[in-house]
Amino acid sequence: MALSRTFLIGSTALLLCGTAARAQEACTTYKVQAGDNLRYIARTAYGDADLYRVIYDANVATIGEKADLIEIGTELVLPCAEATSTAEPATAPAAAPAAAVAAPEPAATETAAATATPTAAAPTVKPIGFVTGNGYAPFADETLPGGGMMTQLVEMAVFRADPGIPYNLTFINDWQAHLDALLPSGAYDLSFPWIRPNCEAPETLSPGDQARCNDFVFSGPFYEIVDGFFAMRDSGLGAATKYTEFEGKRICRPEGFTTGVLDAVGLTAATITLTRPVEATDCFRGLAAGEVDLVSIDAEVGDSALAELGLTAKVEQNPHLMTLLSLHVIAHKSNQRAVDMIGQLDAGLIEMYESGEWYDIVSSALAQNGKKP
């Protein structure tokens, strides 16, 4: 996504991504240099960029409540590595993990996200409840580092918006339930990652996508994806250059993924047979078994699913027919505090572009997924 920007004022460093390795170790102090950000310092000091909050918590009096501008030359305390691994979550100060919201379904899995520096009003503030799910690598899955690329981007956006915002994060694998029940009921406030339909052209939308446009507020785009089609290499469908060549085919697109990309190119219920399983891997198992002809999904998720199933050598992505889409955080319009939080996330996202942290997270996640940024 070509949205990153660079912003420097005088001797103030916006903690930009470093380009040269520097010797940083735990149990020492470190003087901020041009090109630094807290993730970069944490990675070199602890080997884990997600420990940036440990550094922030130890230096909040120096950095301030809003961690957006840190002057070059500022001396930061780098806590000992032992302290980062032995701290008790329930009693730790700023950025200690909060108790996760109980999942409404027995099958749901969950994790606790970091809460922020306590203030006088913090005990009475109900944490913002984020919900995401598994099976959407490299973007969201609790088995991935940091919970996946999108999880890390959202958590950094919260931190950039205001480190004092308390929140928790839960993984619930029924993605459609996020839209149908969890957000409308107020059980959770925000969900990610979701594709925004083309709400400006309602005549092209399916009823489900129209409801998504009518009922939800979308954040700014966190990441752009290429949504396309996967087929068995010996099927000939990987060489198709017109969508009409897919008419009459059996297409699998996981539940929760908008069907607008299919409807927009004429692949409607009248022209194809559509299958909607819960997991992306289910689509590719069906493809390998000859139960479907095509899998409609974004390239990153498709590649991850194929690698997981060991099908990379047998399946190919069509290089001719694809759509560029973007991933967002969503809030139900009936939840005013969640709608307000979308605005804060957008502000934090802009700061991430300016600081270089967006690129740092994305490039690290893609490298782990075996791709170049």
Image (spheres, rainbow, N blue to C red):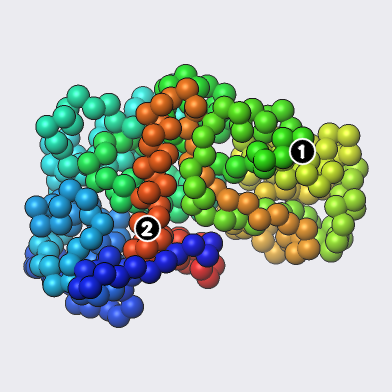
Lateral position of residue 359 relative to residue 274, left or right: left
Disc 1 designates what residue?
A: 204
Instruction: Kindly identify the amino acid type of the residue bearing the numbered disc 2.
Output: Met
Q: CA distance from mark 1 to mark 2?
A: 34 Å
Residue 317 lies left or right of residue 76; in this view the side is right
Q: Is residue 371 left or right of residue 91?
A: right
Which residue is located at x 30 percent, y 55 percent?
Answer: 50
Say which residue appears at 37% left-offset and 58% top-offset.
352
- Badge 1 crowding class, 10 Å Cα cut-off, few under 14, some 14 to 19, many 20 or more, is some
- Front residue of this view, candidates 174 and 166: 166
Identify the residue at horizontal 87%, vertical 57% (top origin). Answer: 242
SS under mark 2: helix
- The residue singled out by tag 2 in the image is 352
Tell me the amino acid under the disc marked 1. Answer: Thr
Tell whether 91 sits left or right of 182.
left
Query: Is any atom of residue 109 visible in this view?
Result: no
Across and down, in percent, residue 126 comes to 27, 26
Q: Quadrant of residue 43?
A: bottom left
Residue 52's spot in the image, x, y percent?
25, 57
